[in-house]
Amino acid sequence: MNKTGVYSKVLKRIVFTIMVILLLTVLIPVTVGIYYFNKADFKCPNDSIYPEKYHVKSVGDSIKYIEYDLLHRNKYGLWEVYISGSPLERGTKYGVLTKDLLQYQENVFVEQIKEIIPSDFYFSFLHKLIAIFNWDMASYIPEEYRKEIYAISQSCSHEFDSFGTPYERQLNYHAAHDIGHTMQEYMLVGCSSFATWNENTSDSTLLIGRNFDFYVNDKFARNKIILFMEPEKGYKFVSVSWPGMMGVVSGMNDKGLTVTINAAKGAIPVTSAMPISLLVREILQNAKTIEEACQIAQIHKTFVSESILIGSAIDRSAAIIEKTPSKTSLYKESDNEIICTNHFQSKEFMNDSYNIENINNSDSKYRYDRISELIRESIPLSPDKVATILRDRRGLNNKDIGLTNQKSINQSIAHHSVIFKPEELKIWVSTEPWQSGAFLCYDLKEIFDNPNRLVESNDKQLTIPADTLFLENDYQNILDYRKQFKKIRESINSGLAIPVQEIHSFIELNPNYYEVYNIIGDYYNEMNDIRKAVEYWKKSLDCEIPSVYESNKIRNKIKDYDKE
């Protein structure tokens, strides 16, 4: 064979290889993506909804009501909502009463996504990816909740219809907590909770506390909803979340069953199933004991790993349902307390590689140990003492680890913080800022017996006072620290220098936090002052760093530049 024939044969092989690579890496994924995008079925209900038939009446600027259902903004800025009826009635009335809040919340959510992804092309691409990811999600969601969400969506804005109908968007928003699992390194989800009972509490009854550290931005957390729900079927319940959220992340029903969720480490999901908040909603609406809650959890398939802390007035104890897409386990403690952060504790997950890596490398075990330490110091616990634990900013052995450290129980990012006393059907809900404002007490028995009580529902005698010591001292430092942090980050991105005095002032705001020195090191690196960059990175390593991953990043930067 002549050279021309050899070259031709080789060229054909190269072309064939390239075509195979393109087929495997581009064409097949694109084809599969188009298939699932076109196949996506959100199972939109075909019921006729007539929001206009519900006539809203107002009392002043803070109360709106439709017959017995109402929306009230209390003097602390919390929105209290009471909704009853069938799924369509509940959803429609909720949407009509909270229309402005729904539209504000979606604007904030979309605004935040656009800040992260400013390109219209990539934003549109993200929408298509989510549609592909959630293509079959609706089939896992009970029809009751789909109808409720559909009815709510009739009051939503059409401004973002290019990214899906209001119903499709609202359904996708219910998976926001789950999608946040893939962002754990950015602390979108890193919650702490615990329960204690018998001789560990001042009156031997069950007490539960939780911080819900799901952080999008300050605007997202501005409007908090305390939703009192009287469904047509199932138990009445209260849920604490945000406008439009009909799933549950923190709640208690009128049988004294409480439910809170904490993200756990697991494989990155490739397709969705039932959003965890809607699974928790089903538990809260239909279970009165730990066993019944576990049975419901086993029935449904979810697409993320989650710890679900269940408290039960009937059982007079608490347990944790540990759930992954493939397995469900119930974890109980022999002692009179149980602590839940972001790792699994049961035998079933003891050898799970994701769980082992999470325990060894994240801040979860550290927060667990700190809660245990504080419980020991606080026995016997009362609601006031639970609030003190939830507000704690220090590390083990009371070490000052810096404000906003992820190893703190209180990182000053909590969307809300709640305390439950299930046997008395009482719930305390935090007010701004974060969990540092007053905790307002609500008595579910009184409210469900007389919904009109909601306007003056919180028991002022049982209000837990604000953390005035923090508000007078560290609160402003945190605000200034975050403002200065953002300014330094912008300087790094722009390459513009900032005055040395501002660097020193920045350190004084939060001198024991590793990230202060880490970002200053990054800044000096950008300014080509490698000696100072390494100096500050080394100072960062002297502080309490939240994860092995983060400390290794800093060590690698030092290794790359340190010539000593």
Image (spheres, grey):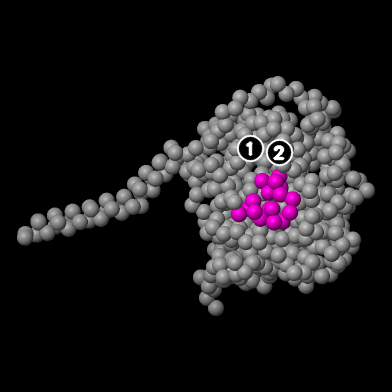
Disc assigned to residue 144:
1
Q: Is residue 439 visible?
A: no
Q: From the viewer's perspective, is 408 left or right of 204?
A: left
Residue drawn at x 76%, y 47% as measured from the top left: 253
Asked whether disc 2 touches disc 1, contact meaning CB atoms under 8 Å apart, the reply is yes
What secondary structure is marked by label 2? loop
Residue drawn at x 79%, y 50% as measured from the top left: 256
Q: From the viewer's perspective, is 162 left or right of 409?
A: left
Query: For this rendering, which residue is in front, 281 or 225?
Result: 281
Residue 235, compared with residue 92, is above or below; it is below
Residue drawn at x 81%, y 36% as measured from the top left: 73
Q: Is residue 288 magenta?
A: yes
Q: Which residues are magenta?
A: 282-298
Disc assigned to residue 233:
2
- Residue 355 image offset from top left, x and y in percent: 59, 66
Quadrant in the picture for residue 261: bottom right
Instruction: Report the amino acid beneath label 2.
Output: Lys
Quadrant in the picture for residue 503: bottom right
| Residue extending furthest toward the right | 461
What secondary structure is marked by label 1? helix
Q: From the viewer's perspective, is 134 left or right of 311?
A: left
Residue drawn at x 83%, y 35% as measured from the top left: 451
**How busy is the neighbourhood of tag 1: few (under 14 within 10 Å), some, or many (20 plus)?**
few
- Residue 216 image offset from top left, x and y in percent: 65, 48
Q: Is residue 226 visible?
A: yes
- Residue 41 image offset from top left, x and y in percent: 49, 37
Disc assigned to residue 293:
none
> Is the magenta region chiefly helix, strand or loop?
helix
Give me the C-alpha separation between circle 2 and circle 1.
10 Å
